[in-house]
Image (tube, helix red, strand yellow):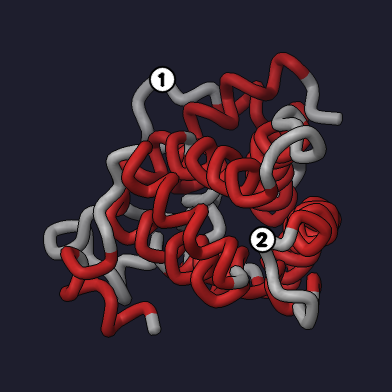
């Protein structure tokens, strides 16, 4: 459990790291930020690696809240998947930026530990969603929950990687919509696809034919 007094400091640390476009979270670097409460941070966190672990745990907490607080049982499976995905998209900057290539390179053990925790959260919910969707005839019956979970999480991380998709060239909303659409099309039955196409129109999402620039990249 993250101490309440530490939460605003973690928010500030994440914000400053993103503003500086740097994930050098050493205490020396943080000490150069005007009015940064370094002494307060040190009272909770003894090392940079512990700080990185706490930042990732903080993001995981927010990520889990989104997944846990959206009922996946009493809805059409595609609607449920879409709703959770839209919430993740809307709050993406709060739950994913620290899972960046820089963090993976600097702190591989911490990154791997965090990835596995997120994968567990996603896997449990996707397993439920897939079971419901198969029962509703929305999803194919030959799907692997572990494989779909890994694809879902890895794509969420990839579309926020500026080396793959620089912000000046790709809109995150368009990338996310394309990623989600590609996933649903890969797991849905003909009945599910028909329903999904209907929901795209109802929710005023772009059909695939209008996303040609992103389509070739994500397939």
Q: Depth check: 117 or 29 in front?
A: 117
Instruction: Report the residue marked by disc 1.
Output: 35
Residue 106 x/y as whole percent: 57, 71
Name the secondary structure under disc 2: loop
Whichever of labels 2 and 1 marks the residue nearer the N terminus, that label is: 1
Residue 174 x/y as whole percent: 28, 55
Locate the C terminus by quadrant. bottom left
Label total for image: 2
Residue 41 x/y as whole percent: 65, 29
Q: How dense is the environment of label 1, judged by Cα within 10 Å: few (below 14), some, or many (20 and up)? A: few
Q: Is residue 5 above or below residue 38?
A: above
Q: How dense is the environment of label 2, judged by Cα within 10 Å: few (below 14), some, or many (20 and up)? A: many
Residue 98 x/y as whole percent: 53, 52
Q: Is residue 132 left or right of residue 164?
A: right
Q: Is residue 82 above or below residue 42?
A: below
Residue at the limit of the structure toward the left, as seen here = 168
Residue at figure coordinates x 28%, y 76% from the top left: 215
Residue at figure coordinates x 55%, y 76% from the top left: 186
Q: Depth check: 25 or 105 in front?
A: 105
Mark identifier at residue 138: 2
Residue at figure coordinates x 43%, y 36% from the top left: 90
């Amino acid at each position: 459990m993250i101490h309440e007094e530490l939460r605003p400091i973690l928010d500030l640390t994440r914000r400053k790291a993103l503003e500086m476009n740097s994930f050098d979270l050493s205490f020396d670097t943080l000490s150069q930020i005007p009015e940064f409460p370094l002494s307060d941070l040190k009272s909770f966190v003894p090392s940079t690696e512990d700080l990185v672990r706490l930042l990732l745990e903080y993001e995981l907490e927010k990520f889990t809240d989104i997944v846990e607080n959206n009922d996946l049982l009493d809805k059409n499976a595609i609607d449920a998947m879409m709703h959770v995905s839209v919430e993740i998209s809307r709050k993406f900057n709060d739950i994913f930026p620290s899972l960046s290539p820089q963090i993976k390179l600097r702190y591989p053990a911490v990154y791997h530990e965090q990835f596995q925790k997120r994968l567990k959260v996603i896997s449990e919910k996707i397993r439920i969603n897939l079971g419901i969707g198969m029962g509703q005839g929305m999803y194919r019956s030959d799907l692997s929950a572990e494989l779909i979970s890994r694809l879902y999480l890895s794509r969420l991380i990839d579309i926020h990687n500026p080396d793959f998709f620089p912000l000046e060239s790709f809109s995150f909303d368009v990338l996310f919509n394309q990623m989600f659409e590609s996933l649903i099309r890969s797991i849905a039955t003909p009945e599910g696809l028909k329903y999904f196409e209907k929901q795209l129109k109802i929710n005023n999402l772009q059909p695939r034919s209008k996303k040609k620039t992103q389509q070739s990249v994500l397939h």
